[in-house]
Image: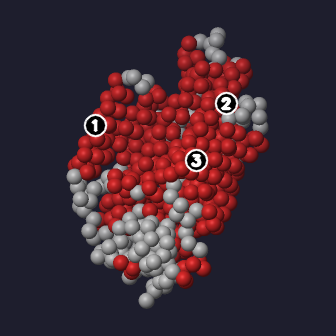
Amino acid sequence: MTDQPDPRRWWALGALVTCMLVLGFDMTILNVALPTMASQLGADTGEQQWIADSYLVVFAATMLPAGLLGDRFGRRSMLITGLGIFLVGSLVGTVVSTPGWVIVARTVMGLGAALVMPLALSVVPSLFGPGERTKAIGAISAASALGMPLGPIIGGWLLDHFWWGSVFFVNVPLAAIGILCCALLIPETRDPAAPTVDIGSTLLATLGLGLLVFGIIEGPDHGWGAPLTLLALFTAVALITGLVLRERRRARPMLDIGLLGQRGFLWNSVAATLVTLVLSGLLFILPPYLQAVLGHDAFGTGVRLLPMMGGLLVAARASAPLIERFGPRVVVPAGLTTLAGAAFLGATTDAGDGYGHTALWLTVVGFGFGFAIVPAMDAALGALPRERAGSGSGLLMTLRQFGGAIGVALLGSLLASGYGDRLRTDGLPPDAADTADDSIVAAHLVADALGDPGLAESANSAYVHGMALVLLVCGATALLAAALTACFLPDSRPARPAADKAQGPGGPGGPGGPAGPGGAAGSGGPGDPAGPSGATPGGDAAAPGGAPGPAAPATPPSHVAGAPGDGRQ
């Protein structure tokens, strides 16, 4: 007997899209709010950095235990819990009046987002079969990435009409709607055999990953050889090493390193992580360029990022037939190569160029991103054993978020170095020169105060030089990812629909059929102990490629959103 698809699945997808949209624009909305918050709250530079970075540190560090909690206690339940935590953090940010409490609010929001990101995606296969899964992933990827340019648009509009706390309050009704829709529309899935949460491993993961992100973020500011930076990095390495050694002794580890032994999961994760690194660099350098160099306001900056989203929407829609025809081994490297070409084109930007040149290469970026990330996420979804649904999704999410953190920290350091080398501050008072060297925004403020148009022109030229260096590194990284995926990705193209009938009830990857997106040929995909039906002892359904079982499958895709915005300009 074959279960009918849940008629509410598209409404449920709408709820998931709403969740990802909120998290997406929350990552960049602070970019336009920080100057206002600095003036109204009296936040110094360090406090502004942590208002932006506290979210990222907690988000990345708690990703792994979040997946395991979903496996253990139910993915829908923990998804609702994460949305509730995010809502509480947003309320706190709305009413506080000091920088310290704003940092606390952002930290709480990061904790909630760490639960929402992997678990929102891990419930997708419980709603959609292999034939609809790529469309669902494409919708979530488009919504999640669309949220990032929406952040400056929404933030700019809110700051023009309301107080600074409105950038937090806007999350409250959307999170509440998400909680209601998840409770009513999404079925519960869990792994009853999942291990209990290991407090020791959770602490090692949280502290180790948190200190690593701290060291990477603070390194450019304090110096890579500074005692604080070195202490954070060495301590992080020691803690993470201890975590790996501890987890290798466990039958069901939280950090499931064995998943990286699966070729499909490993190389699709590499592709997704490097794409995230590139995209994080692009999103970091673009807002200051559009605002300071080209002179657009916050709202106009968000609008001018939309060509990238247009390219992404087209690519997300067009990726499904291309994957079916050519497989991810062809489509993913092609998307990465397109992304590299766009970055190299952007590196030719001159300070005197208008927005038309930027709009061109931003559109190509969208195409490359969509054609690379959607098939990589779909293939990674199929490669995950369903009994490792939450933990595998958490591992994949953690890798991608750390790719984003590294991209922001290292590429931001490269940008600052290129900017500082080219900025001309000869003849300025020492204090004014130091302030202008902090950022292009600060340089323009100094130029306006001193009536020195030459300083503003020098700052623009210096920033475009630093931006070109970043784009060259982004292009080289995308080319490296393209070469690696072209060489090592398995050929896991899905079977044609006409062949499904000839293969019998198992479908692609079912009894006697070729390998489908879920993994090897045979009964139900990798790690499936239950034979052709794909039902596990815990009641989960078939892995992707197997025949539907009595319950919904629990193999998660990974998050497709871009990297968090740093907020520093």
Left or right, 232 with reference to 418:
left
Residue at image coords 48%, 49%: 270
Q: Residues within 10 Å of mark 1 (few under 14, many from 20)?
A: few
Disc 2 residue type (three-letter) = Val
* Spot occupied by residue 97 in the image (x, y as percentages of width and height): 43, 42
Residue at image coords 72%, 34%: 349
**Judging from the image, what secondary structure is the residue with disc 2 in?**
helix
Evaluate whether residue 80 shows in this view. no
**How far apart are the alpha carbons under marks 2 and 1?**
39 Å
**Nearer the viewer's eye, disc 1 or disc 3?**
3
Q: Which residue is mark 1?
A: 238
**Nearer the viewer's eye, disc 2 or disc 3?**
3
**Judging from the image, what secondary structure is the residue with disc 1 in?**
helix
Residue at image coords 36%, 75%: 540
Residue at the outermost bottom position: 1
Image quarter hosting the C terminus: top right
Evaluate whether residue 63 shows in this view. yes
